[in-house]
Amino acid sequence: MVTQLQKPDYETKTLAIANGLLMATREKKNFLAQMRDQMRWDDKIMDFAMDNPGLKVQLFRFIDALPALRSKPEIARHLQEYLSADAVELPGALKSLLNFTNPDSMPGQLAATTVAPAVETLAYRYISGENMDKAIKAIERMRKDKLTFTMDLLGEAVITEAEAEAYLYRYLDLMAQLSAAAKNWKTVDAIDRAGDHPLSKVQVSVKLTAFYSQFDPLDAEGSRQAVSQHIRTLLRRSAELGVMVHFDMEQYEYKDLTLAILKDLLLEPEFRDRDDLGVTMQAYLRDSYEDLEGLVAWAKQRGTPVTVRLVKGAYWDQETILARQNNWPTPVYSQKVSTDANFEQMTRLLLENHQYLYAAIGSHNVRSQAYAMAIAEELKIPKRNIELQVLYGMADKLAKILADKGYRVRVYTPFGELIPGMSYLIRRLLENTANSSFLRQNLEDASVEDLLAAPQFAPEDQAVEAGEPEDWGEWAPPFENSADTDYAIAAERDAATEAMETVRQQLGQRYRPIINGEAVNTDTSLDSVNPSNPSQLIGKVGLTSQAQADAAIAGAKAAWADWAATPPAERAAILRRAADLMESRRAELNAWIVLEVGKPLGQADPEVSEAIDFCRFYADEMERLDAGYAYDYPGETNRYRYFPRGLTVVISPWNFPFAITTGMTVASLVAGNCTLLKPAENSSVIAAKIVEILYEAGIPAGALQFLPAIGATVGAHLVQHPDIHMIAFTGSRAVGCEIYAKAAQWQPGQKHLKRVVAEMGGKNGIIVDESADLDQAVQGVVYSAFGFSGQKCSACSRVIVVEAIYETFLNRLIEATRSLHVGDAAAASTKVGPVIDAKAQEKILSYIETGKQEATLALSLSAPEQGYFIPPTVFTDVAPDAVIAQEEIFGPVLAVIKAPDFDTALAIANNTDYGLTGGLYSRTPSHIDRVQTDFVVGNLYINRSITGAIVSRHPFGGLKMSGVGSKAGGPDYLLQFLEPRHVSENVQRQGFAPIAGVDD
């Protein structure tokens, strides 16, 4: 944080200007105006929201859903469902309105016809119009008040390349229409000229990410190329029309790449001399002052100024939640006053460099605007170099007052339909109703001294700047998960690239079984290859023989007594050391996953996080369980404790070769069991890396045996061996059922029944109902279906769509899928990589042929010829009982099923042999409530993707034919690796026993 400069002091002039602005904006309404406002339902909605936090949340959720509701009964039903929640205290007017029993009734329809138009009226306070005619009329009204504008097209969240292309052409058309209209506008010197300098009458604001549906900081170069091509087209046309272009700033994850792209583009000779372009800075970001300093240095190099629109930021809640969910540093200040303080120091930096960067000060806080005005007047900044900005409908009176004082005032003016504009509307409503909002405080007549006091950085934010941990208030995570790598940070991308090159130099080495701590030679081996490029050898893996497996079992049996007697705290400490080693080797381990199983980096990295979490979580859990339970009575002590089972065989999968393999292995080990790890053949090199780390962390040689082998022979032998006490398996249904059956068979010499924990896949469905947010639903289904080429046991293979929105959803789904990049998993642009091997490829292709016979092939993309690639494939007109709707395919094949209504959709979703994961996209409270009991799956996800379970937060495991055993990463998982024992002792001696509390 940069300390606020003291000289020159603008405070006296700031307060004088701010007092004048404040008094002018506090002008009281006359009696008739007050009465009129009390009659308006759009005003009542805002009042209700400000008076009751619980009502505000539910009311805004209803407003978010409203544009998707297609009838008055639907509107009435949702209104009643949202506002009948326990947390809502209804004011009398709303209680009367909701007093109906049937949404189809006259009272229900009255409620719908009262509230829906009020919300629409409220929306168009902040949106200039749903079509160009209305928007132009709004602009012309503003020009009469000497206000100019910048126009923003609502609905810029693009999820398909077709939408990105359409976004560009909508802006090209918008500029043309506005330019044509501007020819009829009389020149207003206050806004169309700056001294002798003529200014364009038209400005548009655009968002960089809307030009490319796959915009991703991880693929910085690909995103740069795709976006830059469209921006050049836009800028060339804007030059022909004489239109100013301003680039908005969005979420924090895009900030650095957005700035880098714009800096490079605007240094190109074609655009370097233009001064009618602008960028945006958000003062609520902790690193924004440093960014502005960098922009000043860049502008000096460029030689021609650009405009910097300085705003406080509109995504505070989202940025804070995202950081906490990912255990990342929070990029925004925690306190509003800190944002205000940073805004002022950035205002000062910007205006004191006005010859290099023009300033556009965007705020509704009269103190913030007054501070800028004071500096401008003190430094005699030319009119071309500064303007003041407000949002449409947010501070109309302030805008007119600023214009009357001779400043150029620009109104940020969104236009478009209500559905794409809903996220914008919700942000405006949140801003207007927030307790910290200047507009609300001014409306409630807060004291002048409080409103105009010079903002200072809050102690909480100063502490973070000084390196202290963030204070998250009363909430703390039940378990602190490992943070995924933030690839928005260039240094992290560079580290990933470097690690990939380092690992490539290590390919082709030999990996041998490890028995009793010694690597042993084998008679046979297999080649583990890169599925993106099968000619590339990842490693040559020695295959354990049956005799070697028997030696490993004997060694584990001999080591078991010592390992079981090792205090649980010591075993837990080893797991925590392993977690630390994994964290230190994260970039390298990611590279091995990318290369050996073809998992793109963006999905490999969370897998390493999951493995780290398993180590730490199971360490904590073992220490918790070690305490046991005491059930004492007078004269009798009762102890319930847990003990290791014995020897565990872990048979791990290739699809989560690091996370699941680690999880099953360390769960067994920390419980005190000696463990024999038989990894999937296709991912044996990654398993070898896990074993290497566990040995380094301190696992004794005999406690962990590494046995790469053929599952059908040596794997089966291990399962049936009489000395094995437990099998932990993840893989296919067929193999899991075979293991379950064979483990149940008693073998000569066996003195126990074997415990089997098996996770066996699914046929996972997502329901999309008529109230769903389709932007969210399409993105979630595409990610769930095609992430890691559909090779996750949690992947979506069926999407059941309610008929009312079927066609709209399907069209966007197909285009979003078409926009995915298919290719080498190591390429930064790849979203869909290869499948694991030729056998899997052949099996999936056979299912696709079956699908062609029983459904309609709606989409099949092209794929590279080299490698085991299957392109994303979408089938429509799929019957619920079709083969491709019932059998697990384990590839990038999605069946789209139409359902007449939600009830039918839920029945279809449940009608399979499996019960692993499921999802619902809906904004209907009763639907959300119902699936929580009636959707029969082990893991249910609502309004989010159905893959990517996180340890402790999402304990993972299924029902029915999806598996047997408790959930991985949950509070019951370790119990499966332990045997409970109870000891009851009579502590009476000659009739005497201590009784607690008697002799104290």
Image (tube, rainbow, N blue to C red):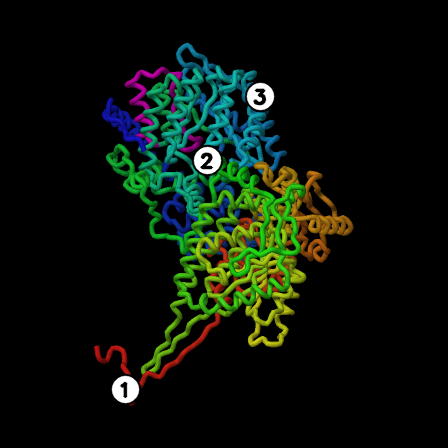
Give the residue pinned by disc 3: 176
Judging depth in this view, the residue of 416 and 545 nearest the camera is 545
Q: Which amino acid does label 2 sit on?
A: Ala
Query: Which callout, 3 or 1, points at the residue further toward the start of the chain?
Result: 3
Residue sticking out furthest to the bottom: 990
Q: Where is residue 474 in the image (x, y as percent from the top left)?
A: 34, 52
Secondary structure state at the residue bearing disc 3: helix
- Name the amino acid, label 1: Phe
Verify CB contact (< 8 Å) between mark 1 and mark 2. Answer: no
How far across and down, in percent of the image, does residue 63 sit? 49, 45
Residue 18 sits above or below residue 635 on the image: above
CA–CA distance between discs 2 and 3? 41 Å
Q: Nearer the viewer, mark 2 or mark 3?
A: 2
Residue placed under numbered mark 1 in the picture = 992
Badge 1 element: loop
What's the magenta region? 365-394
- Residue lying farthest top? 196
Q: What element carries label 2?
A: helix
Answer whether residue 595 is visible to the viewer in this image.
yes
Instruction: Kindly tell me whether residue 936 is visible in this rendering.
Output: no
**Nearer to us in this view, 719 or 59:** 719
Tell me, yes or no, whether the two marked residues, 3 and 1, touch with CB atoms within 8 Å: no
| Mark 3 → mark 1, Cα distance in angstroms | 99 Å
Magenta stretch holds residue 694: no
Which image quarter is the C terminus in? bottom left
Residue 748 location (% of width, % of height): 62, 76
Q: Earlier in the sequence, mark 1 or mark 2?
A: 2
Q: Which residue is drawn at the image coordinates 47% and 25% (left, top)?
A: 150
Residue denoted by label 2: 491
**Residue ID at (41%, 10%):** 196
Crowding near the residue tagged with mark 3, few <14, some 14–19, many ≥20 C-alpha atoms within 10 Å:
some
Q: Between residues 74 and 200, which one lies in front from this camera angle?
A: 200
